[in-house]
Image (cartoon, rainbow, N blue to C red):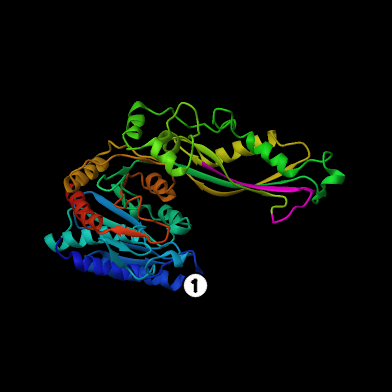
């Protein structure tokens, strides 16, 4: 591609900025990345550029709105990155971009600076070729995605007219595998909480009190066990409210994603999978709701031995939600269950930590189908439509508030170590990504 080396050199400049949003000592670096991005968008021909201050890190906004009568596309991404630790596991420093085997290694290479920069360069390429864009374009880029986007949802709510668009375009997801593009059309919601269970006002001597007083760990284990039945189904009354039976088309889309059960079990060191009866592994992890115990603590667990009856025990729980499940309603249902099944002699306090609504997108939507056509034109392979088991809360916010289809055109690969040492992006996908986005915008 013309200018490819120049584009990569510019991406390197972007990647050199340690814009780690979760670490206060990098606050100025995050701001520097926002200013750098503003300059790059200006070079690409984007107008009305702003670096908008929030209570945390800035939002970068810009637009080009001269395609009268044509659709408007809002491009979202994030310029903040994860910390580099453990730094000793990086083959080359995290903020010194390095090319090895046609892969560009650096923190943020695939999540999300590299993928975001694909859109900046696609717009610049179209402007250089035609002097204008085939559609209206808006950019809304945040610097807090890696810390759960605390300030972007209220910004979207308060700026609906400013951000109004016919489609929201996001590149922060992955292919299925090398050479097989994917457009994610479903993301599960999330609910996380912590439980603190107490019995006596202090740990007690097991020889003096054991067998005569409630044990906090026993009580918590029994309580947690009550959350599922023997078939793997969540036994909380009201938990499945809003969960629809999957349609045959949805199950077919899930089944179309390549998956090797035996290989996966071998890689994970498992003898068998586990989960809700009547559903495949891919359905359980992509389109069904879950409730998982993430952590359990209590009593004495240091080296040596201490004969006590523990008076406190703690657990962390997370749920993945689908369909019409409302995080607040699920939380209330779990509270009711815990109260109903609370062991004798125990008190339970529950603190809610995270909520995110699920989002489901219609793969037949014209905006998504045109994206599929653009992938096929450049890669020669039609994309698949995976259902991601994880959560990207801001997708639901864009979809609900702006009432626009969200098109998740990812160009990463699952193997690119996002959030881990030696994060990288395949330069082939960076280059082809620019061509794909260019083709997509033209097709609208």
**Magenta-drawn segment:** 302-319
Q: Is residue 417 above or below residue 374?
A: below
Q: Position of residue 20 (x, y in %)?
A: 44, 66
Say which element carries label 1: helix
- The residue at the far right in this view is 208
- The quadrant the N terminus occupies is bottom left
Check disc 1 and report the residue beneath it: 25
**Closer to us: 366 or 101:** 101
Name the residue rendered at 32%, 38% in the picture.
Answer: 258
Q: Is residue 312 above or below residue 419?
A: above
Name the residue rendered at 41%, 62% in the picture.
Answer: 81
**Closer to us: 145 or 45:** 145
Query: Does 225 lie within the magenta span?
Result: no
**Picture quadrant of residue 425:** bottom left
Query: Does 317 lie within the magenta span?
Result: yes
- On screen, residue 187 versus residue 240, left or right, reads left
Name the residue rendered at 40%, 35% in the picture.
Answer: 261
Q: Position of residue 203 (x, y in %)?
A: 79, 50
Q: Position of residue 191 (x, y in %)?
A: 53, 44
Q: Position of residue 116 (x, y in %)?
A: 31, 58
**Closer to us: 43 or 297:** 297
State how many labels appear: 1
**Picture quadrant of residue 363:** top left
- Could you classify mark 1 by the number of other residues whose Cα lies within 10 Å: few (under 14), some (14-19), or many (20 or more)? few
């Amino acid at each position: 591609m013309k200018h490819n080396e120049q584009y990569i050199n510019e991406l390197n400049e972007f990647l050199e900025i340690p814009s780690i949003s979760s670490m206060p000592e990098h606050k100025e670096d995050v701001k520097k990345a926002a200013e750098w991005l503003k300059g790059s968008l200006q070079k690409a021909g984007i107008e009305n550029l702003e670096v908008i201050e929030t209570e945390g890190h800035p939002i970068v906004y810009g637009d080009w709105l001269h395609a009268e009568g044509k659709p408007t596309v809002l491009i979202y991404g994030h310029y903040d990155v994860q910390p580099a630790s453990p730094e000793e596991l990086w083959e080359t420093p995290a903020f010194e971009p390095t090319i090895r085997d046609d892969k560009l290694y650096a923190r943020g290479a695939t999540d999300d600076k590299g993928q975001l920069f694909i859109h900046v360069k696609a717009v610049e390429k179209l402007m250089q070729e035609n002097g204008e864009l085939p559609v209206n374009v808006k950019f809304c880029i945040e610097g807090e995605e890696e810390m759960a986007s605390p300030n972007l949802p209220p910004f979207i709510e308060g700026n609906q007219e400013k951000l109004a668009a016919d489609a929201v375009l996001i590149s922060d997801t992955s292919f299925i595998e090398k050479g097989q593009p994917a457009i994610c059309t479903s993301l599960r919601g999330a609910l996380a909480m912590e439980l603190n269970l107490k019995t006596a006002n202090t740990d007690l001597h097991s020889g003096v009190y054991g067998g005569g007083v409630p044990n906090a760990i026993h009580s918590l284990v029994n309580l947690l066990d009550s959350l599922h039945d023997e078939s793997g189904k969540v036994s909380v009354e009201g938990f499945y409210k809003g969960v629809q039976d999957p349609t045959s088309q949805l199950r077919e889309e899930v089944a179309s994603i390549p998956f090797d059960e035996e290989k996966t079990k071998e890689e994970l060191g498992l003898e068998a999978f586990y989960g809700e009866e009547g559903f495949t592994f891919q359905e359980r992890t992509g389109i069904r709701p879950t409730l998982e115990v993430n952590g359990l603590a209590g009593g004495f667990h240091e080296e040596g031995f201490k004969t006590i009856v523990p008076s406190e025990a703690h657990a962390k729980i997370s749920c993945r939600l689908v369909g019409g499940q409302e995080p607040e309603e699920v939380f209330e249902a779990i509270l009711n269950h815990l109260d109903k099944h609370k062991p004798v002699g125990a008190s339970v306090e529950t603190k809610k930590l995270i909520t995110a609504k699920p989002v489901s997108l219609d793969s037949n939507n014209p905006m998504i189908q045109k994206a599929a056509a653009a992938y096929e034109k450049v890669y020669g392979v039609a994309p698949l439509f995976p259902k991601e088991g994880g959560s990207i809360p801001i997708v639901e916010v864009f979809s609900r508030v702006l009432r626009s289809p969200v098109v998740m055109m990812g160009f990463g690969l699952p193997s690119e170590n996002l959030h881990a040492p030696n994060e990288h992006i395949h330069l082939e996908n960076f280059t082809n990504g620019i061509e794909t986005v260019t083709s997509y915008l033209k097709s609208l």
